[in-house]
Image: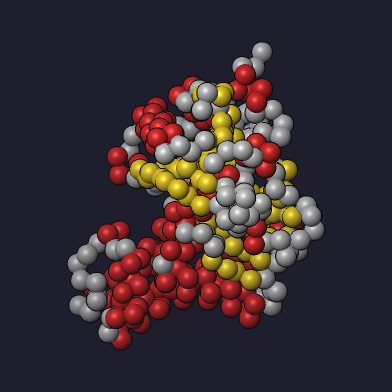
Amino acid sequence: MPDQAERTCAPPFVHGAETLPWGVTVDAYNAEIRAGHGFLGDQASNRAFKAILDHWRAKLQDADEDPLGETPTDAISRGQLDRMLAEGDWEAGGLVHGVVEEFAQSLAEVAGRLLDEPAWHGTECVVVGGGMRASRVGELAIGRASMLLKGDDGRAVDLVPIRHDPDEAGLVGGAHLVPPEALSGFDGVLCVDIGGTNMRAGVVLPELDEAPDLSAARVWASEVWRHAKEKPGREAAVGRLIDMLRGLAGKAEEHGLRLAPFVGVGCPGRINGAGCIERGGQNLPGDWEGSRFSLPRSVREGLPRIGGRDTAVVVHNDAVVQGLSQAPWMRGVRHWAVLTIGTGLGNASFTNRDGG
């Protein structure tokens, strides 16, 4: 016999669902295409970008001409690369341009392979999110990859940077997991974005009075934890997440905000109807995969009530959720998709049920 929270999460509150509120259907996500000894997506991740940079730095170091000196590649931020591009000398700028070009070619190849997947046929626009989108270097890579797709492959598909700040897109997208009627009458909703490096929780204000399609939704308050540095076990990580949610709920109450009794969660991997991660959770802290661990159940147990009401938790893939933040601006197309460049490369494709 399911408990009250599980009954609350009955359809349309289905974890990893295909048919989502706000007129969007998920055609496919978390595609794992083999390429050589690994997966195709590994060629267009943050790790891949750093590997390309490291490769070219090694060549320059042999000639004692590395503009980045002795700083380890992993310690170099995209902000530093942006400054080199804008303010560095001609060789420093050339290094960054070369890395961007090589990465853009990989990104275009990955996007092209995904566009050949049956679920991606007819895609008109691919939104690119993740941490790289927050930098000028990342935007240039996205723009160059878009040109390569059109010029070399002749595909009539645009690659565009995600509209929201990448640190907030995964949180804003979480509000799209909750139907309009469930948000009506409330000021905000708790949302979570779990990645292979960071874990974010925030209060999202839907602002339905201003824009009933969630295009005005924004993050009111958030907290981020870089779990990759601390390398906690699963229970410690979930405990930290619950502490973040409790703190944010308390802050919202102090400011007189009425929170809807829901938590929208984006998490890496293939999510089944019970909210368990079937596969793809290898970058998470500890063992999150398998039927023995239910993230929504753990969150409900740690935060059983919000505003005096039983909490419902809805979980979907993090790339899906980040992509949903772009949904209000995709109404002009029928088929669209998202790529998220992070620790790995997330992917999802969508259809607008209203026909665009």
Comparing 57 with 21, the one in front is 21
Q: Quadrant of the C terminus?
A: bottom right
Q: Does residue 321 sit above or below 85 in this rendering?
A: above
Q: Residue at x 63, y 55 (%)?
A: 211
x and y, in percent, of residue 310 in the image: 57, 23
Q: Residue at x 44, y 34 (%)?
A: 253
Q: Does residue 65 sit above or below 13 in this rendering?
A: below
Q: Residue at x 73, y 43 (%)?
A: 19
x and y, in percent, of residue 345 in the image: 52, 55
Residue 249 sits in quarter = top left
Q: How is the image coloured?
A: secondary structure
Is residue 97 left or right of 218 when viewed as pictured? left
Q: Residue at x 24, y 72 (%)?
A: 68
Residue 84 appears anywhere in the view: yes
Q: Looking at the image, how many numbered discs can be counted on the residues?
A: 0
Residue 234 appears anywhere in the view: no
x and y, in percent, of residue 171 in the image: 50, 47
Name, please, the residue furthest toward the front. 256
Comparing 218 with 107, the one in front is 218
Name, please, the residue furthest toward the top. 1
Q: Quadrant of the N terminus?
A: top right
Comparing 261 with 131, the one in front is 261
Q: Does residue 118 sit above or below 241 in this rendering?
A: below
x and y, in percent, of residue 291 in the image: 57, 26
Residue 15 sits in quarter = top right
Name, please, the residue furthest toward the right. 355
Is residue 96 left or right of 41 when viewed as pictured? left
